[in-house]
């Protein structure tokens, strides 16, 4: 899976004009989205335990990165037009090193800032994307009461995460990594999730019902 670092940093000699840059970015996002979809459908059951774990970590990291490309935040979520999109990793996140490689890359016109921490005080000022580590699951009720800021795309990998206030839950099924979305929680946080992303979700929850 050496494609990972190469995919994250689009560079090309043709990027010498805004028109070429726009065309190249469109193609790059299309290919990135295709790869995103392929990860959902390629089984990993035949891989060795270590290789499986590595692929799973890469898939989860790629999920988080692509979520930033397929979610829209309102202008009120930023103080300035080119303020960064902040991706916070809260807890012990085994795939955090994969996301270090995308720190500073552009999402549209905004740089992506990756922040890793195990101290809630470090993220008190707000995050645009917040991934909650598995060991923090017992703190979820208290956690949501303490997090007061809006416009946050909360992502986890715990059972019933989307039923407990989270927006996207990443989970491993029998032989692949997938995700569920709670669209009601997204709307409540002022976020718009692209239909392209929703089409890849395993289930879409609306708090009152679940769509498959």
Image (cartoon, rainbow, N blue to C red):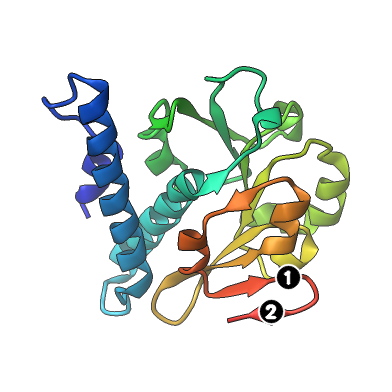
Q: Using the rendered view, name the quadrant where residue 157 is placed.
A: bottom right
Seen in the picture, residue 54 relative to 149 is either above or below; the reply is below
Measured Cα–Cα span from mark 1 to mark 2: 6 Å
8 with respect to 63 (left or right): left
Residue name at image x 21 percent, y 40 percent: 6
Q: Give the residue displayed 78% in from the left and 71% down from the top.
A: 207
Residue located beneath label 2 in the image = 210
Residue 161 visible in the snapshot? no
Whole-percent x and y of residue 198? 53, 65
Within 10 Å of disc 1 (Cα), the crowding (few <14, some 14-19, many 20+) is some
- Asked if the residue under mark 2 is in contact with the one under mark 1, i.e. CB atoms within 8 Å, the reply is yes
Q: Secondary structure at mark 2?
A: strand
- The extreme left residue here reads 13
Q: Quadrant of the C terminus?
A: bottom right
On the image, the x and y values in percent for residue 100 come to: 41, 34
Query: At 43% from the left edge and 49% from the top edge, which residue is drawn?
Result: 66
Disc 1 element = loop
The residue that appears at 74% across and 35% down in the rendered structure is 120
Above or below 78: residue 33: below
User: Does 164 sit left or right of 78 as displayed?
Assistant: right
Look at mark 1 in the image and give the residue it sits on.
Answer: 206
Q: Nearer the viewer, residue 186 or 170?
A: 186
- The answer to whether any part of residue 33 appears in the image is yes
Relative depth, front residue between 104 and 137: 104
Image check: 147 left or right of 6? right
**Residue 7 relative to residue 114: left or right:** left
Residue 183 in the image, given as x and y percentages of width and height: 68, 62
Q: Quadrant of the N terminus?
A: bottom left
Q: Examine the image and state in which quarter residue 151 appears.
A: top right
Q: Eyeballing the image, is 80 above or below 40? A: above
């Amino acid at each position: 899976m050496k494609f990972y670092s190469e995919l994250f940093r689009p560079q090309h000699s043709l990027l010498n004009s805004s028109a070429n840059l726009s065309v190249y970015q469109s193609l790059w996002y299309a290919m990135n989205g295709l790869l995103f979809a392929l990860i959902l459908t390629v089984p990993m059951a035949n891989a060795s335990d270590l290789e499986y774990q590595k692929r799973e970590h890469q898939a989860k990291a790629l999920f988080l990165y692509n979520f930033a490309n397929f979610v829209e935040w309102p202008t009120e979520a930023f103080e300035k037009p080119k303020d960064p999109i902040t991706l916070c990793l809260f807890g012990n996140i085994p795939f955090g090193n994969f996301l270090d490689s995308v720190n500073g890359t552009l999402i549209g016109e905004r740089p992506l800032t990756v922040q890793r921490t195990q101290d809630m005080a470090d993220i008190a000022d707000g995050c645009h994307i917040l991934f909650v580590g598995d060991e923090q699951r017992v703190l979820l009720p208290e956690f949501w009461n303490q997090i007061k800021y809006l416009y946050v795309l909360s992502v986890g990998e715990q059972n019933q995460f989307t039923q407990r206030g989270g927006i996207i839950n990443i989970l491993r099924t029998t032989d692949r990594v997938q995700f569920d979305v709670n669209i009601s929680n997204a709307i409540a946080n002022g976020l718009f999730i692209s239909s392209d992303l929703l089409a890849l979700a395993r289930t879409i929850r609306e708090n009152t019902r679940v769509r498959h």
